[in-house]
Amino acid sequence: MKEIDWANLSFGYMKTDYNVRINFREGAWGELEISSSEQVNLHMAATCLHYGQEAFEGLKAFRGKDGKVRIFRLEENAARLQSTCRGIMMAELPTERFKEAVLKAVKMNERFIPPYESGASLYIRPLLIGTGAQVGVRPSNEYMFLIFVTPVGPYFKGGFAATPYVITRKYDRAAPLGTGIYKIGGNYAASLRASHEAHAAGYSAEFYLDAKEKKYIDECGAANFFGIKDNTYITPLSSSILPSITNKSLMQLAEDMGMKVERRPVAEEELTTFEEAGACGTAAVISPIERIDDPENGHSYVIAKDGKPGPICTKLYNKLRGIQYGDEPDTHGWVTIVE
């Protein structure tokens, strides 16, 4: 294969050798199949195409200094996928089958796992879609679960650096009690326009306020928000925010560091009080926030006064990355080592 420039990888798709698939038919999950095709053969009336029966996950594998390959919080991703399946009436894949598929996909594409200290990792994308032909609006009776992997560089080109974000009031990503808590493609489709406008205006990403009152910080299009003040890690509590596994991990690490952790509504005006803030998710881990502008309200909340990531964001980021790469002890049992 062509030599990969690990240090300059973008966060994008690169063809790898194999993907794995499991089909659900006649009320049961079948055997795991290995494929080298990048194509999926779908019926034109498949429910994923018409009624949005589609769910996905994102997790990563890392090569450590010791040469071992570690997958971060695999069981949590399986549990979140199961929650999404319950939310949009899809067949749930058991955790053991999810784990089997992830390990197989990683092992079979081991040559694409970036080396230690390259700044890159192997992104793992599980996907579950309704494949049964349906014209009436109802759940499918057949599903396909598949996993492909691709080596990726940092989500943001600048890596771990403080960048500006913008509040959008024109658009809502998800409604309270809607599908915001599930990882489905529709939520991301709903964020594309606001995201495009934010990028065009020079921002890293957009932030949404709660859809009901437009008073509280909800989340970024593809990440959770957290703020730091008075030795406290604060993250919004909302019925429309995706439960981020990275955020959950950071809350635990903040507690381990002796910080208080609060999950509660965060009013927009509270942004003036934070000493540090970040957007967090699998892709970027932590993207420190320099400032959050609210152009429609004429406000700019400057958080990183010197334009650099703060000490607590930096410590949390390094700790989490250290666990992922095996440089820090895995005291919470978050890592699965690929044997």
Image (tube, helix red, strand yellow):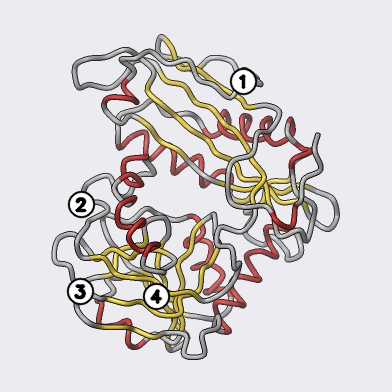
Amino acid type at circle 2 is Ala
Which of the labelled discs sits on residue 175, or is there none?
A: 2
Ranked by sequence position, the earlier of labels 3 and 2 is 2
Label 1 belongs to which residue? Answer: 37
Q: Residue furthest top?
A: 26
Image point (40%, 80%), residue name: 291
- First in residue order: circle 4 vs circle 2: 2
In the shown orientation, is residue 291 left or right of residue 212? right
- Quadrant of the image occupied by residue 301: bottom left
Measured Cα–Cα span from mark 4 to mark 2: 22 Å
Label 4 or label 1, whichever comes before in sequence order: 1
In contact (CB < 8 Å): disc 1 and disc 2: no
Q: Is residue 110 above or below residue 214?
A: above
For the residue labelled by badge 2, is the local secondary structure a helix, a strand or a loop?
loop
Q: Residue at x 55, y 80 (%)?
A: 309
In space, the residues marked 4 and 1 are separated at their CA atoms by 44 Å
Quote the CA–CA distance across marks 1 and 2. Answer: 37 Å
Residue designated by label 4: 234
Q: Residue at x 48, y 74 (%)?
A: 163
User: What amino acid is at disc 1?
Assistant: Ser
Q: Is residue 145 left or right of residue 2?
A: left
User: Nearer the observer, disc 4 or disc 1?
Assistant: 1
